[in-house]
Image (spheres, rainbow, N blue to C red):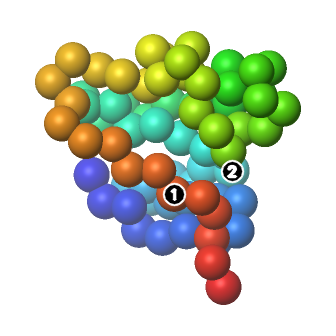
Amino acid sequence: MDIEGTTFGTITIDGKTYEHDVIIRLSGEVVKRKKKLSKKYYGTSHVLSRDEAKFVFEKGCESQTRRAGERV
C-alpha cells in the first residue's frame, strides 16, 4: 500500500484518488469514513464519537493515525 500524496480534499492511494475521508483497513481495503456517526453527536466530524470508533476499530490494530486536512 502506497499513499502517494494528498492535496486539500483528496488523498491518492495506490494510484486511485479519493475525494473523501478514508479508512485503510488492516487488510488493505480502503473504505469511506462514516463521518455522520460523529457529526450527529458533536455537530462536527473533528471529534470521534463512540459509534464511529466502533466502526473504525479492528481487532489486532495496535495504533490509529488521524490527519486533520492538508496544510499548505
Q: Does residue 47 lie above or below 9 as drawn?
A: above
Write the residue at 38% across / 61% down: 3
Q: CA distance from mark 2 to mark 1?
A: 15 Å
> Which residue is more in the foreground, 10 or 41?
41
Q: Does residue 25 lie above or below 6 as drawn?
A: above
Write the residue at 47% across / 50% down: 66
Query: Which quadrant would residue 40 be assigned to in this image?
Result: top right
Q: Which element is circle 1 on?
A: loop
Sequence-first tag of 2 and 1: 2
Q: Residues within 10 Å of mark 2 (few under 14, many from 20)?
A: few
Q: Which residue is mark 1?
A: 67
Q: Nearer the viewer, mark 2 or mark 1?
A: 1
Query: Which quadrant would residue 49 be assigned to in this image?
Result: top right
Q: Quadrant of the C terminus?
A: bottom right
| Residue 36 visible somewhere in the drawing | no
Write the residue at 57% across / 14% down: 51
As shown in the figure, which amino acid type bears the numbered disc 2? Glu
Which label sits on residue 22? none
As shown in the figure, which amino acid type bears the numbered disc 1? Arg
Q: Residues within 10 Å of mark 1 (few under 14, many from 20)?
A: few
Q: Position of residue 37 (x, y in %)?
A: 68, 19
Write the residue at 76% across / 21% down: 41
Which label sits on residue 19? 2
| Residue 8 visible somewhere in the drawing | yes
> Which residue is more in the foreground, 47 or 2?
47
Query: Which quadrant would residue 8 be assigned to in this image?
Result: bottom right
Q: Position of residue 2 (x, y in %)?
A: 31, 59
Query: Taking 39 as reference, is 30 left or right?
Result: left
Mark 2 touches mark 1? (CB < 8 Å): no
